[in-house]
Every structure is written in C-alpha cells, then in structure tokens.
Image (cartoon, grey):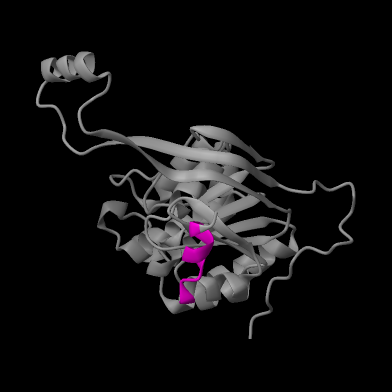
Amino acid sequence: MQPQPQAPSSTQSAAEPQSIISVQNVTVAYRSYKERPSSLKESVIRLMRTGKFAGSMTMEALSNVSLTIPKGAVYGLIGSNGSGKSTMLKVLAQVLKPTGGTVTVKGTVASLIELGVGFDPELNAIENIYLNGSLHKRSRAQIKSRVESIIEFAELREFATTPIKYYSSGMAARLGFSVAIEIDPDILLVDEILAVGDERFQVKCMEVFHRLLREGKTIVIVSHDLDMIARTASRIGLLSRGHLVFDGDPRTAVQMYRDSSYQTALTHS
C-alpha cells in the first residue's frame, strides 16, 4: 500500500511562506451569443440601436472565488462538468487572465492541463523534449542530459523517433507527464489527463507525487476519481457553476458532491 500524503504540519517554519498559491475574489467571465449577426453591417446597426450585440450575454466560468494553498499540500478540485475546474487550473497556470480579482503564485509551475499542449504533432518525442526544454530556457546540454530519463519514464523508447501525431492518448499523456516532472517544478497542476494512462503508469505517477511532496512541492489535482482524490488530497475545493461551495476536509467534500448537498450551499451562498 502506498503511503498517503499528509497535510502540512502546523509547526511549519515561520520562514516559509504561509501560502504558495493565493486566489482572491477571482472571476472569469466571457460573452456568449444566442444568435450571431450575419454581417458586420448588421452588427453595427444592432449595436447602435440597442447598445449591445443582439442575443449577447455574459457568462461566468468562475465567480468571486477565493482560496489559498500552502506549500507542500495536495489540493483537489472536484465538481460536475462545466463547474469551472479546468478554468481554475488555467488561471493558476497563468495562461488565462481573470476578469476580476488577483492570483499570486510563488514558484515555478508545470501544468498537465490538456493533452498535446506545447507539443508539435509533426515532431517526434525527442524533438519535442528539446522544444519544451528551450521554452523553459534550458540549455541544450541540460536538455540532452534529461532526454534518456524522460523517454525511459514515459516508456516510449520504441517510439522515440515517431511523430507524436501517431501516438495514442495514453502515450501522449505519458510523454507530457514525464516532461513536466523533469522541469522540477515547485507547483504541479494536473487535470484529468492522467485518466487516459493505464493503471500501472498511474501507480508510477502516484509514486512521483509522493516524492514531490517529500521535497516540499505543491500539487493541484482535478479529477472525477473521487476515491483517489479523497485519499490523496489534504484539502478539496468543490466547484459548482463557477462558485466555490466548499473548501476543506476531502471526505466531506466528496460526500457533499455525491449526495448533491452542495446544491443547497450554492442556493444560500
């Protein structure tokens, strides 16, 4: 049985930051359209008549969300599809700028949010490792020293020179995970991407998580695997329609999601 990650000790040194991630009153809004104008001329006419584009409305993927995540914690995010989980990860990865509020992230970040992001499908695994390394400002010598370990961990030796456009989703996930952990990040953001890997590789990933935690790293996980996330996370945030309706004990969060009691919390929020 794998040892379970533990929540940070209350005796944590005062010299360490109280939080490595701070999200304060974050809102992410976007405009959607029930009907789109058929031409630019129609758009201008409707805008002059009504002061807005016809059929437009503002949707909030995240609504006034606040949370803090301490150094060395595993923080889980759960919720139904469309609740804002992936949007929150993109905000934390700083690839999506919030409409309102502030986000503070202390340290280097590696993210596994979407399969294939940052990879060129026409290049093979080795070429993509060099591409990714250069984007993270690694020298050619630094990248070369890590190629073998990345390929070995990803179990892609036979396919190292095959363009990744021919990879299965599981192969791409293994490569993405292996590249991310070689960056040696302070914070690792993980979406459902690992769900496409086989059980044996998921065990390898969990072993890496435990190693990162022993080294004081911070992990944020989005998953629909409620049993896994309840065992792994030291705290869980439950999102519903862009609102953070619970932030605390993992088993309480999972139970609220399973029995839908979070909907009552949302109604009274």
Q: Quadrant of the N terminus?
A: bottom right
Residue 111 image position (x, y, % from top left):
51, 50
Q: In which image quadrant can residue 197 be found?
A: bottom left
Residue 32 image position (x, y, % from top left):
28, 37
Residue placed at 38% from the left, 57% from the top? 160
Total labels: the figure holds 0
Between residues 87 and 262, which one lies in front from this camera angle? 262
Between residues 153 and 69, which one lies in front from this camera angle? 69
Of all residues, the one furthest to the left in this rendering is 38
Residue placed at 30% from the left, 63% from the top? 168
Residue 94 seen anywhere in this rendered image of the structure: yes
Horizontal arrangement in the rendering, residue 20 relative to residue 258 (left or right): right
Residue 88 image position (x, y, % from top left):
50, 48
Of all residues, the one furthest to the front in this rendering is 268
Residue placed at 73% from the left, 53% from the top? 71
Part of the protein shown in magenta: 259-267
The rendered magenta stretch, by its main secondary structure, is classed as helix
Between residues 108 and 254, which one lies in front from this camera angle? 254
Q: In the image, is residue 123 part of the stretch drawn in magenta?
A: no
Residue placed at 69% from the left, 41% from the top? 106
Q: Quadrant of the C terminus?
A: bottom right
Q: Please, is residue 82 above or below residue 208 in the view?
A: above
Residue 93 seen anywhere in this rendered image of the structure: no
Residue 253 image position (x, y, % from top left):
57, 69
Q: Please, is residue 40 above or below residue 250 in the view?
A: above
Q: Please, is residue 257 above or below residue 61 in the view?
A: below
